[in-house]
Structures are given as structure tokens and as C-alpha cells.
Amino acid sequence: MRRIKIITGFFILLFDYVSPLFILLFIIRMSQGKDKSKSLKSKKLKSPEIGHRFSSTSVLNYFIDQSGMPFAFSLNGKALGDSLHAGHQGLPEHMYQGYVLSKNEDKNEHEPFKSVFIENRRTFLLNGVLFTFLISRFQLPDVGRAVAMVSIRDITASHEITGDEHIDEILPELIAGNMTDVFYVYNEQGKLVFVSRAIEKLLGYSVEEVMKSSIAEYIATETKSQLNDYLKKMLGLKNESLQNEEEKNPRLFEIQMVAANQEKRWVEISVAPYTNKNNLVKGVYGIIKNISEQKQIQEEIQTSLQFEIERSKLKSKYISSVSHEFRTPLSIIYSNLQLLESHFPELDAETIADSFSLSKLAVKSLLRVLDKITIIDAAGKGKLEFKPLLTDFPELLRDLVKELDDMEIVAGRILVKADPRIEKVYLDDYLFHHIFANLLQNALVYSDKKQFVEFSVSMTDSDFLNVEIRDSGIGIPQEDMDLIFEPFYRASNSRFSKGSGLGLAVVKECLKLHNGTILIESQTSRGTTVKVKLPIMQNDAV
């Protein structure tokens, strides 16, 4: 007996265009003759000989155009060209004779393409061997050159084993069993009468387990309602006539199904009614396709898209904020240069000195903004480093306060109260400077020019500095507290005060590297208190 392996290409073509309808027709036939099929069920599923011999069958496919001419021949998925003749290379003689039989079938049919599906079994004798063929013709959607597909299957081996009576029951299960997607059928009473073995790979449940309940039992609760409503609607139409072809078209749903290991998997499930020759609804069928991987890719794309949107917003805020912060100092510098250029001979020494002083302040303001941007950028790239050095702490405080006083129109507003025991300590003076320069600047900016800012430094033990900054300014609204450390974020009551929204973001990044902590307590119109705890090492501990 000739045995030629059916390769993957045929199954792809057959399953995409033919299998669901082919299987459905046979499932309907099976459900109408249960008593007879039950007696054979155990035999056909358990017989390894049948499965092996079926895998050895040959399948010849070709298409027919509107003029009735055949084209696009293939044997077991391998292309043979647009014409066929006796002795064709790669084509067994008995398969060519099967093709001749199929052409005779076309001649015998008065209306060859009016029916969706036509199937006949034919036998012939060749060189003393009796061959049996199953010749199937399928109507195709009118969207291209092909109007029908013909499939010629050599079923000699299976015919010898099972006979004519049971071949139709075995074929649909063999085809459905090789589908990667799940095929299912409900009868008109709403009972699940068939589900393919692919359900075991999808959910981890056996066919028998699923058949005892319903596919709907394995759908996640949050995605169940819409599909269930449509199923009930379709099954409620039993024995009603569907004249509109659109009503027969499959509906697609994306739902989640729960596997045996409780893992949720996204699937695309199609649902369509099937009818008899009188267009009466006799049940529902469909295909379940695992789309978990596609969903994951979609989510990753969506996440990436959202990230790009957020980054774009951040860039816009950055440009807007930096432009605003640069505009005022540059305007001061430019106006003073114009004054000196146009009226220098007429100006007295005091006016000239004031112009230079204001220009210097403007330059320092620009440098401060640039410092903030540099720190945020370095932190984002992982290039901001922690470099502790032995530091003269009283001198560090004096330099910090002096720099801030020089930037203020009204100097001397910072009241320093430092523990005299704190002298030489190991800390990162660069990070320390940016932490407390930004906190003190915020306190000064958001307080009245006549109000003082308290700056207290103490040491409760030898390993930590406790720093507290207290002001009586405008305060921070409670609804803004969770967002104030985000870059470019400014509290809702701060729009009338200058600022870039970068200060507290810089504080956050510097404290993170220095392993420090921060606590902010604030009440609108009553002021803000900032408490910072910073780890240090004193000289005698090194």
C-alpha cells in the first residue's frame, strides 16, 4: 500500500479555507446518529493502526475558475503547477486517475457551484489494486479568480479498515485533531457536542472534562457577559429561518479563559449559527484562537507609546520651564548692557556698580537653573555619584548661606541655628549644597520678603544630621503633596512666584544617593516645615 506523508503546507491551506465547514458538516451528521457512533467511538480513538494509516494518505488539491478551468494543483501541499497530465513528475499514477474521476464529477453536475459543499466517494481498479477516493468540492467566496476548490483524498487504507459506514465519523476528528486552534460545536439544545483536542493544549483540561460542562464555564468572569449574551441569542433562534446571509457570518469576541493552572489566557473566539438546507438554525459553531502572545505585544506597544507620550510631555514642560527661567535673567543682562552701552559717559559710579551687580545676579540665576538640569540629567543616566569627603561643616554652612543672601534683594533672612559640636564630618559637600540650597531657596521664594526662614542643624547621635527648615509662607496645598517631587511640577498656588519646578526633584535625587530621608509638613497660608535626616561620619569615627 502506498503511504505518502501529508506535509504541513496542505493542512495550512485546508484548515484555513475548508476544515471548519468540513468538520461542522460531519459533526452535525454525528450528532444526528449518536447511537451508532457511540459503539464505534472507543474503537476509532484507541486504534493506533487507523491513525497511522490515515497519516499516510495522499491529497491532491486544485482550484477551478469561473470558466470551469482547473489551476494551482498541489499534492500534499507541494505545488505542481497550473496543469496536470499523465506521468506528471511527482504525481503517482493512481492520484492522476483520481483527478480524472473528479473531472467526470464536474461534468455530471448541472450546477457545479451552487452548493457550498459536495462530496462523493469513488473507486476504480488500477493494475489489479482497488483504490477508493473521497472527492470533495467547496464553494469559495467570490473575491478572486478561484470560485471552487476540489480535494481528492486517497482513503483506500481507511476504507479497508473501517468500511463505508464509519469513515465519515473518523475524518472530522482526524482533521480537527491536527488543528492548532480549537473547534467547537453546540447543538440546537445548547449542548456542547464537539470540541477538538487543541483545547487540552490551550487550557490544560481534557476533552472529556470540557464536554461534561461547557466552554463558557472556563471564561473569566470579567469577559463572560457579552459572549454569553450572543450565544443565548443564537441558540434561542433554534428552528427559526435565517434568510439574511449576514446573520450567518461569524461574530468575533476577545475574551480571557482560565486554564487548569489558573492562568488567564486571551483568546479570540468566533461564534456563528449553522443551518440546514431550509436555513433553519440547528446550533452554533466556532473557532477559539490563542492570542495571548499578540495581546502581550499590544500591551508592550501601548506601554511604550504611553512612555513616549509622557516623555514628550516632559520635554514640553522642560522647554517651557527652562525658557521662562532663562528669559528673566537674560532680559536683566541685556537691559543693563544696553544701559551701559548707550549712557556709560553719563552714568555715575554707583549706577554702573548696580548694573554690574544685577548682571552678576542674573548670571548666577542662570547657572543655578543649569545646575538643576545637569543633576536631573545625570541622575536619569545613572551618572550622578556619591563622593564623601572630610568637610569643615561650619564653613560649608557659611558659604551656603552667603551664596543665598547674595541672590536675594533683601539679605539676612536666613536664621541659622547649628549645633556647635558639629565640626569635621564626612559627607558629599556637592550633594549637601544642592539639597539645602534648593530647600532654602524655596522657603525664601514662597515667603514674604519681610519674613525670616529658620535653618536649624542638630545631631541626635554621631551618625545622623537632623536639619529643619521652617518658613511662614504660602504653604503647599494637600492635593499637591504627592506630586511635588516630580520634575517640573509646581504647586497649584505657586503660579505667581518664579520657579522651574526642578528644585525638589533635585533634592530627591541627591538625598537618594546620600541615603537621606525627607519629611514635609505644610498648611496653606501658614507655612512649611521640612525635616531632613542625613547620615554622616565624624572625623574621630574614620
Image (cartoon, grey):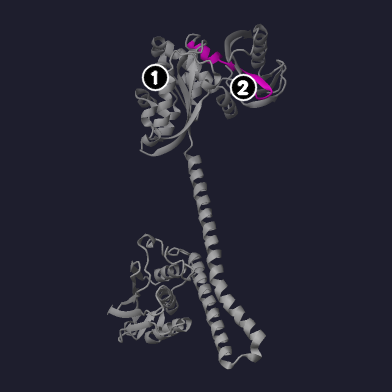
Relative image position of residue 220 (x, y in whole percent): 38, 35
Q: Residue at x 57, y 78 (%)?
A: 332
Is residue 171 visible from the viewing direction of this image? no
Q: Which secondary structure lies at badge 1?
A: loop
The answer to whether residue 107 is above or below residue 7 is above
Horizontal relation, residue 288 to residue 460: left or right: right
In this rendering, the answer to whether 518 lies above or below 115 is below
Occupied quadrant, residue 79: top right
Camera-side residue of 402 and 536? 402
Label 2: which residue? 141
Using the image, determine if residue 234 lies above or below residue 277: below
Location of the C terminus by quadrant is: bottom left
Look at mark 1 in the image and give the residue it sits on: 190
Q: Mark 2 and mark 1 in contact (Cβ < 8 Å)?
A: no
Give the Cα separation between the discs numbered 1 and 2.
29 Å
Q: Amino acid at mark 1?
A: Gly
Please provide the residue range marked out in magenta.
140-162
Q: Could you classify mark 2 by the number of other residues whose Cα lies within 10 Å: few (under 14), some (14-19), or many (20 or more)?
A: few
Tell me which amino acid carries mark 2. Pro
Which percent across, then down, holds residue 213? Answer: 35, 24
Which tag, 1 or 2, sits closer to the chain's start?
Answer: 2
Q: Residue 7 occupies which quadrant of the picture?
A: top right
Q: Secondary structure at mark 2?
A: loop
Q: Is residue 354 left or right of residue 433?
A: right
- Most distant residue in the bottom direction: 349
